[in-house]
């Protein structure tokens, strides 16, 4: 309590997002997040490498679990995006009273999210896996893994919320400390708990889930401590956890569209798994491996995205058009360069990437073609990711939702289904570049309208 009182008495200084040179600011804001997410993606890959050593069915089960896990993360992250967007704009307006209200109501919403998904963890896993496969081993692996991750998901919701509070005030370096702590715990305990090292029992796939939970709680603890001791622009209080409908409404004005945007991926993966499973369950494993590998490329771009959102939001609140537009341009250039590196790696070394996951001959045959075709859309996706974040920063969550909805449900999923009718599984992967190009067209149209209405006339 004394730490919180000391925090509340501290003065609030001019935020660096309003005056620091933009190139330096974008690097200082984004680089810690890019490094953090790069390390997290490395963990995701290593986690799947360990699980693949159990069996291909275990890897398939974890791949099938992704839609529900993604839904959970979508609710946590989408709510945090709403908090981030609103809080950054209020900081730009120097409305510090509402800054505190946004932060404390955000923590309240994190607790509510945890309670909901804990209940889901008791009810959903078994019927969910039975809807996708009749393979008894895959079902048991999946139920065990998912149940642990959902029931103990408090660390997910609270760590993401506390990290976003740090990011909203420009302290992405501190947010990185929290995320790296969680990743380190995951990496250390994964092999120990899966294979029973250092005197621990061999828990198999349950060990992978428990290691994940350990990492999430470690990140949550560190992020909370850093907010109390270092984040002087936000004043946390237990009294502030009382919900206020007006603040929650403003958070979810951006948060709900963001949740829907990220949740659409769950629908996409679920039905793609069904489409791919009609050919072979190995194709599902390949798709799961692709998701892990592509995070190695996409996560740094999302880190760049997370660093740019508060800068755009802050300067939009301060009505500084020049800084808003230059931030967008610099972010696009950096994102494209990252994606081009990923494209080259996927095109030149698909077999080496698949070998990390104890790939079978069938997995090599399907996966080599899949990785090369899907990677074509990486540079196009760079534009879409950055431009979509502009809508979030300006509080225009609906536009961001429209782009993601179009790409995944209107373009990608129908294209995948139609291409599957050819009877050639290789054709399905072309749905990714097709959908990305069409969604970029939609994104540019919406951005032009938003620019004319919201940005063009800024002072």
Image: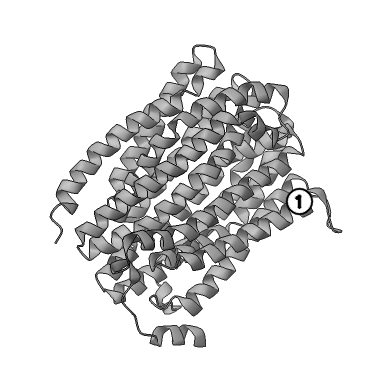
**Scheme of image coloration:** one colour
In the rendered image, residue 63, in percent from the top left (x then y), is placed at 61, 37
Instruction: Determine the residue positioned at 61% across, 48% down.
Output: 42
Along the horizontal axis of the image, is 112 left or right of 121?
left
Instruction: Determine the residue positioned at 21% across, 62% down.
Output: 320
Q: Residue furthest right?
A: 199
* Quadrant of the image occupied by residue 212: bottom right
Nearer the observer, 240 or 364: 364
Q: Secondary structure at mark 1?
A: helix
Nearer the observer, 228 or 142: 228
Q: In this rendering, does residue 76 appear at all?
A: yes
Nearer the observer, 342 or 13: 342
Q: In this rendering, does residue 273 appear at all?
A: no
* Quadrant of the image occupied by residue 310: bottom left
Query: Height in image: 31 above or below 452?
Result: below
In the rendered image, residue 180, in percent from the top left (x then y), is placed at 59, 61
Packing grade of label 1 (10 A; few <14, some 14-19, many >=20) is: many
Instruction: Determine the residue positioned at 57% across, 22% down.
Output: 369
Query: Height in image: 27 above or below 69?
Result: below
Instruction: Determine the residue positioned at 36% across, 50% down.
Output: 331
* Quadrant of the image occupied by residue 368: top right
In the rendered image, residue 176, in percent from the top left (x then y), is placed at 52, 63
Along the horizontal axis of the image, is 406 left or right of 146?
left
Residue at label 1? 191
In the rendered image, residue 452, in percent from the top left (x then y), is placed at 15, 47
């Amino acid at each position: 309590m004394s730490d919180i009182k000391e925090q509340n008495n501290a003065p609030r200084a001019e935020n660096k997002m309003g005056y620091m040179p933009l190139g330096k600011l974008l690097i200082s804001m984004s680089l810690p997040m890019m490094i953090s997410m790069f390390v997290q993606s490395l963990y995701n890959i290593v986690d799947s490498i360990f699980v693949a050593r159990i069996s291909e069915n275990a890897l398939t089960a974890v791949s099938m679990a992704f839609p529900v896990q993604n839904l959970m993360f979508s609710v946590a992250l989408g709510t945090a995006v709403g908090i981030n967007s609103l809080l950054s704009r209020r900081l730009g307006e120097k409305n510090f009273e509402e800054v505190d209200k946004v932060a404390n109501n955000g923590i309240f919403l994190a607790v509510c999210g945890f309670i909901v998904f804990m209940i889901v963890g008791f009810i959903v896993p078994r019927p969910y896996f039975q809807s996708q496969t009749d393979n008894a081993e895959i079902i048991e692996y999946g139920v065990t893994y998912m149940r642990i991750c959902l029931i103990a998901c408090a660390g997910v919701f609270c760590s993401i919320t506390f990290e976003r509070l740090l990011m909203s005030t420009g302290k992405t370096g501190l947010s990185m400390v929290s995320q790296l702590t969680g990743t380190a715990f995951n990496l250390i305990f994964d092999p120990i708990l899966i294979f029973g090292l250092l005197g621990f029992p061999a828990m198999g796939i349950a060990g992978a889930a428990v290691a994940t939970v350990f990492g999430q709680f470690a990140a949550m603890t560190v992020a909370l401590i850093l907010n109390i001791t270092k984040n002087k622009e936000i004043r946390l209080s237990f009294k502030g956890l009382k919900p206020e409908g007006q603040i929650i409404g403003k958070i979810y004005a951006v948060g709900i569209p963001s949740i829907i945007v990220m949740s659409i991926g769950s629908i996409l993966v679920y039905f793609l798994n069904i489409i791919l499973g009609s050919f072979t369950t190995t194709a599902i494993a390949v798709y799961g491996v692709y998701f892990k590998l592509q995070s190695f490329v996409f996560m740094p771009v999302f880190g760049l995205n997370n660093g740019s959102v508060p800068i755009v939001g802050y300067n939009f609140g301060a009505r500084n058009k020049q800084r808003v537009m230059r931030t967008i341009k610099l972010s696009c250039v950096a994102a494209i360069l990252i994606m081009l590196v990923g494209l080259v790696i996927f095109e030149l070394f698909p077999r080496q990437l698949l070998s990390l996951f104890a790939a079978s001959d069938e997995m090599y045959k399907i996966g080599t073609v899949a990785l090369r075709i899907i990677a074509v859309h990486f540079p196009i996706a760079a534009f879409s990711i950055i431009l979509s974040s502009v809508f979030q920063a300006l509080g225009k969550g609906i536009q961001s939702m429209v782009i993601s909805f179009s790409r995944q449900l209107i373009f990608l999923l129908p294209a995948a289904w139609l291409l599957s009718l050819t009877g050639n599984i290789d054709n399905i992967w072309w749905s990714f570049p097709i959908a990305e190009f069409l969604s970029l067209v939609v994104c540019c149209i919406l951005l032009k309208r938003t620019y004319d209405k919201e940005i063009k006339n800024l002072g």
